């Protein structure tokens, strides 16, 4: 009898320990908010954790996509033990066409970006008019004496017309508009100088991630930033053009690799958004449409095997094997939602892993679009960050709504 009691006690202890461990695991690892899908049951794949709510009459119900209402619910272990509260938002499944095609970016800034402050050589010494006026690296110069500027030539012409007199500059700094008084200096050569380096356009290679039935496309998965300031480039317009990839500098543990190619005259579309979720625009003519792919919800993405679609040579988009090794909560940076590792021997032999130009390569897992490559780890080119697909698609939908409103 004592032996039976000991066995039962041991089993009860093990059961309680398992419940405690699974509850603790769920509390820290399950998301704080979920978006349901009208075409799939809302449940964890292993059925250990269920999403439940308590109705006004005290009845407990397990939430599915068909009966989900926006509001608060909770995860429960085996439908019995409460784990944590979760907010529920019903949503219809999104579908997109995946690309993986490399493209050339030509961006034209909204104003000009100040990338350097320099001294001017004067007859009496050296001084910087830009620094004296309070200008800083990273400022976006929008106007000079009420005239909008969008190019280096605009700035040079307006400075030349001041005859050395004081002018008002309108700048954007950290999202705030500021007005500064500025007086150019006349160098010892007699030329009026502003004492600043500016940039008005940007170009590079990236990967188109997806496009929609409305011909809105997204790429890169991160913003285009200035190489000198690290700031996101504010754009007024831009173009996506076809690019022919003709080589690759392989990535190493000391430096990031890079795809290189030649821009062609074939225009793919217009770019209008440069955000921390990628670049977005309208495609001129959609490529031959393949089968639409469902966009994965955050809770559907798992660590484990996946594939990316990338263009690394003249053969165009190809599938390569990767692993998703870590998933971050929704509170992480838009650009760094998960970590992936390249496992495909062919890709490793060609590029060394993830290289510049592959940003935007779509990631597929279990037949769903789950994300896009964004950054490579400089000290380990086999690994890098990726963005969740739903973050990019959300930005594309916002852009499409603006297009509809403007029309």
Image: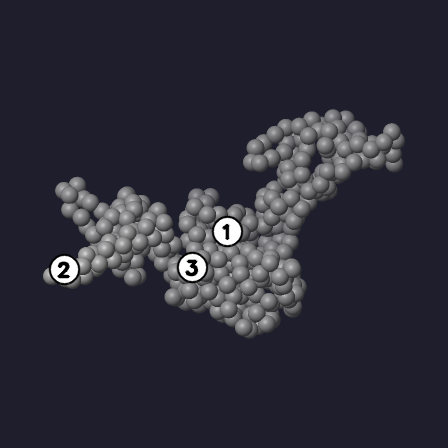
Task: Give how far across and how far down residue 333 sits, in percent.
Answer: 48, 47
291 and 26: which is toward the camera: 26
Q: Are marks 1 and 3 in contact (CB under 8 Å)?
A: no
Q: Position of residue 252 (x, y in %)?
A: 63, 63
Residue 255: image location, x then y, percent: 65, 59
Dot 1 lies on which element? loop
- Camera-nearest label, 1 or 2: 2
Between residues 155 and 348, which one lies in front from this camera angle? 348
Label 1 vs label 2: CA separation?
Answer: 60 Å
Residue at horizontal 34%, vertical 53%? 25
In the rendered image, the residue lying farthest to the front is: 2
User: What color scheme is it?
Assistant: one colour
Q: Give me the residue at 55% from left, 64% from top.
A: 382
Going from N to C along the chain, the mark reached first, 1 or 2, is: 2
Q: Nearer the viewer, residue 18 or 176?
A: 18
Residue that carries the numbered disc 1 in the rendered image: 335
Residue placed under numbered mark 3 in the picture? 370
Outermost residue toward the left in this view: 1
Residue beneath disc 2: 2
* Image x and y of residue 261, in percent: 65, 64
Q: Secondary structure at mark 2?
A: helix
Q: Nearer the viewer, mark 3 or mark 2?
A: 2
């Amino acid at each position: 009898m004592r032996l039976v009691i000991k066995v039962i006690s041991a089993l009860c202890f093990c059961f309680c320990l398992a419940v405690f461990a699974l509850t603790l695991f769920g509390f820290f690892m399950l998301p704080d908010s979920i978006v349901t899908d009208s075409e799939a049951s809302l449940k964890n794949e292993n059925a250990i954790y269920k999403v439940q709510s308590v109705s006004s009459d005290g009845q407990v119900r397990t939430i599915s996509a068909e009966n989900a209402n926006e509001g608060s619910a909770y995860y429960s272990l085996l439908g019995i033990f409460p784990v944590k509260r979760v907010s529920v938002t019903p949503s219809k499944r999104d579908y997109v066409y995946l690309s993986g095609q490399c493209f050339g970016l030509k961006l034209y800034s909204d104003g000009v970006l100040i990338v350097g402050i320099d001294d001017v050589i004067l007859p009496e010494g050296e001084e910087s008019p830009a620094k004296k006026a309070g200008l800083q690296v990273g400022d976006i110069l929008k106007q000079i004496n009420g005239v909008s500027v969008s190019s280096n030539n605009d700035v040079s012409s307006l400075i030349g017309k001041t005859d050395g007199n004081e002018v008002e500059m309108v700048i954007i700094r950290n999202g705030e508009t500021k007005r500064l008084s500025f007086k150019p200096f006349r160098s010892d050569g007699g030329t009026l100088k502003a004492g600043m380096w500016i940039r008005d356009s940007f170009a590079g290679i990236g990967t188109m991630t997806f496009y929609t039935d409305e011909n809105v496309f997204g790429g890169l998965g991160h913003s285009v930033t200035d190489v000198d300031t690290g700031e996101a480039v504010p754009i007024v317009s831009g173009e996506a053009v076809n690019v022919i990839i003709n080589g690759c500098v392989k990535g190493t543990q000391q430096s990031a690799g890079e795809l290189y190619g030649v821009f062609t005259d074939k225009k793919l579309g217009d770019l209008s958004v440069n955000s921390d979720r990628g670049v977005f625009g309208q495609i001129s003519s959609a490529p031959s449409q393949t089968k639409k792919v469902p966009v994965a919800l955050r809770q559907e993405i798992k660590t484990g095997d996946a594939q990316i679609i990338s263009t690394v040579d003249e053969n165009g988009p190809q599938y390569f094997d990767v692993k998703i090794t870590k998933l971050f909560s929704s509170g992480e940076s838009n650009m760094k939602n998960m970590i992936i590792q390249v496992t495909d021997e062919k890709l490793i032999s060609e590029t060394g892993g993830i290289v510049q130009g592959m940003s935007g390569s779509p990631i597929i897992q279990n037949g769903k679009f789950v994300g896009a490559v964004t950054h490579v780890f400089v000290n380990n080119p086999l690994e890098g960050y990726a963005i969740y697909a739903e973050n990019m698609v959300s930005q594309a939908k916002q852009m499409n709504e603006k297009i509809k409103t403007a029309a």
